[in-house]
Image: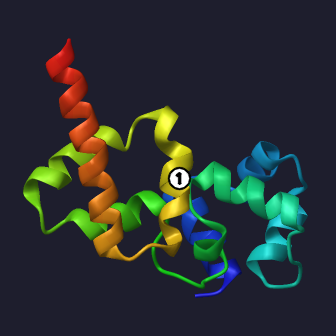
Amino acid sequence: MTFSDRLRELRKEKNLTQEDLAKILGISRSTIAGYETERKEPDYETLKKIADFFNVSIDYLLGRTDIRSPVDEITEAVSDDPELLEFWNTLKEREDLKLLFKQTKKLSPRDIKQIIRIIKAIEDEEDKGE
């Protein structure tokens, strides 16, 4: 998929018009239309705004991966371990760990599992101390 395909798909998933998205991003509707018809390309700052708004990675927007976000990558890595998956599902909502999740894109699924296990061990130890 191309950037234009991804942008259109994400916009429609949120039931937004081009005008709605333009207002959210602080750009014109014609600029959004240009992105979706491949007549224009966003600058880096706009690309970051789009990725942040839709909660996807820039690589996903550009069609370089089908994994929408680092959170999805971690979910995929721990999906074969029910205990880790359950723990991950509570952990992924924590704002204080969002930066950590962004760092996983260079890690193997095995390494991701190991990190989640370490975080779980720390959390379990803290729970015992309370």
Which quadrant of the rendered structure holds the C terminus? Answer: top left
> Where is 110 relative to 86, above or below?
below
For the question of whether residue 106 can be seen, the reply is: yes
Q: Quick one: label 1, few (<14), some, or many (20+) residues within 10 Å?
A: few
Q: Amino acid at mark 1?
A: Lys
The residue under the point 53% across, 52% down is: 14
The residue under the point 32% across, 74% down is: 109
Residue 112 drawn at (x, y percent): 35, 64
- Under circle 1, the secondary element is loop
Residue 13 drawn at (x, y percent): 49, 59
Callout count: 1
Residue 35's quadrant in the figure? bottom right
Q: Nearer the viewer, residue 99 or 114?
A: 114
Which quadrant of the rendered structure holds the N terminus? Answer: bottom right
For mark 1, what is the residue? 14
> Where is 4 relative to 50, above or below?
below
* In the image: residue 72, left or right of residue 106: left
